[in-house]
Amino acid sequence: MNILSNLLSQPAQNKPQKKQRRGIEIKSPREIEIMRQSGKIVATVLKEISELVKPGMTTADLDAHAERRIREMDATPSFKGYHGFPGSICSSINNEVVHGIPNAKKVIRPGDVLKVDTGAYYQGFHGDSCITIAVGEVTPEAARLIRVAEEALFKGIEQVKAGNCLMDIAGAIEDHVKANKFSVVQDFTGHGVGRNLHEEPSVFNFRTREMPNVKLRAGMTLAIEPILNAGSKYTRTLSDRWTAVTVDNSLSAQFEHTVLVTETGYEILTDRSKV
């Protein structure tokens, strides 16, 4: 889940969490094992949604499935109640960029580009991941946008290892997106994740000098989540105060994984291929 920068350091209101400490937390082996479980829950739910979604369903149907399955696996939805967000998933379609609110009147149609983002809070720690689903047959442009968005995520993840820096991740994502003639959304970023859904550091998808170029250390857990638009990088927020859309009505796609930094590389904690 992306969130505006002024909310990054605030803990979720509906979860019994410890007060967030300043700086970047390094997870212990015990905490990492719990995060493997929270990540597995998220991966399981997203894999199930990718397999069950079909035209005619509503985004509320997907939200109900996600909440039921998260609770069945002894976790609670990370997003529900977070700063007042009403759903267990963010469901954003076509020109909707992030934070789409599930709605019983929002019918999924053939050709839609559907983003589903969800999180699970398990034994004190969060997992967070997002996928983009091509609903039925989509346009060639939409298919390419989805493919490049997923590729960009893995280009960023490939830069993860102890000793590398955040801008290594950002640069790899930005270069791949620009090489494919799409734009990187700059209004939202990835983030640290753990005891809180959003922790330090901010994980940018583009090069910037506005934030410290943090050196990665083993035990960091990061939510890496590039968002690509087919047109302008700029977004605006609708009157519901959550849903962000592209200013030019162009399509948007997003992928996200919770990733553990290791001494030699990375471990994807929300890997759907392992569930």
Image (spheres, rainbow, N blue to C red):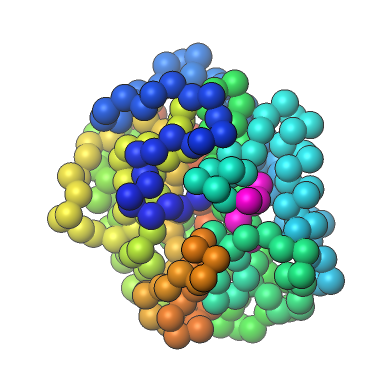
In this picture, residue 62 sits left or right of residue 7: right
At x 19%, y 45%, the residue is 213
Q: Against 165, is 32 above or below?
A: above
> Which of the 4 quarters of the picture holds residue 147?
bottom right
Q: Quadrant of residue 78?
A: top right
Q: Residue 195, image x and y in percent?
A: 46, 27
The region drawn magenta spans: 86-91
Q: Is residue 100 above or below residue 63?
A: below
- In front of the other: 20 or 206: 20
In percent of the image, x 37 and y 75: which residue is there?
Answer: 234
Q: Is residue 142 visible?
A: yes
- Indicate the quadrant containing the C terminus: top left, top right, bottom left or bottom right: top right
As drawn, the residue found furthest toward the right would be 56
Q: Residue at x 76, y 70 (%)?
A: 105
Do we see residue 203 in this rendering?
no
Find residue 184 and report its horizontal and vertical position in percent.
37, 68
Q: Position of residue 169 (x, y in %)?
A: 32, 50
